Amino acid sequence: MSRASIVIYNRGNETLDLLLTINVNNVIFTATGENSVIVNSLEGKENLILEIELLESVVEQDISIDVKHVAVPNSEVRLDIQIFAGTEQRDVHISDGDTVEVQYTVWDADTGEELDSGTWAENSGDPFGSIYGFGWSLIGLDIDNDRGALMPGLDTGTTHTTLLPPPIAYGNNEGHELENVWLRFELKLDRAPVS
């Protein structure tokens, strides 16, 4: 079962009640176990991270997540997502709370300037220093059954790229030079826990 995270950000000042619906039945919101979820009282300038799950293997599939205001159903935002299987199937899929070690590189998404790179051990779902969304970027990474421990230097984990808007990047750090910057992370999974 593969998982990923999506971010809902209320750019306005008004508190919103939202209905999110995935247009297929084989992808669900983890919180509800269904392809829809109601988000109550998302305050202005606040965000919410939701985990989604793929219930069956697919080679390639396009899905959409529609977000509607509960009181104004004609208002709608759509997020289109392309799901595709990697060239190699991995045995372990990272979920919320798993301890992982990743190599990361981060760029300013607007300018393309590389800001930092290194190795980081973290629990998926937890913040990376003051970057709230980093831990959620780890969910969905895969690794072989060796969990990266048996043959150091051998690439057995997957890589993916995530885009973090300012509220879950440095947006909560008033006065930080990157407070209003979108961050692009490339993450490579090196190690995962033995279960």
Image: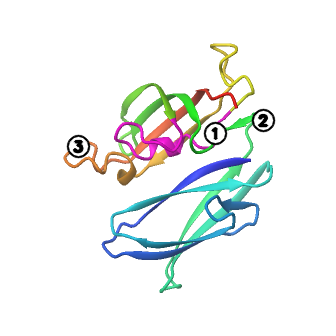
Residue tagged 3: 176
Residue tagged 1: 94
User: Is residue 51 rendered to the left or right of residue 42?
Assistant: right
**Between tags 1 and 2, which lies in front?**
1
Residue in the picture at 73% in, 38% down = 86
Residue in the picture at 70% in, 59% down = 62
What residue span does the magenta drawing correspond to?
123-142
| Residue 149 position (above or below residue 48) | above
| Residue 162 position (above or below residue 90) | below
SS class, disc 2: loop
The quadrant of the rendering that contains the C terminus is: top right
Circle 3 Cα neighbour tier, 10 Å, few/some/many (<14 / 14–19 / ≥20): few
Residue in the picture at 37% in, 62% down = 46
Which one is earlier in the sequence, the residue at label 3 or at label 1? 1
- The residues bearing labels 3 and 2 have C-alpha atoms spaced at a distance of 40 Å
Mark 3 touches mark 1? (CB < 8 Å): no
> Which three-letter amino acid code belongs to the residue tagged 2?
Gln
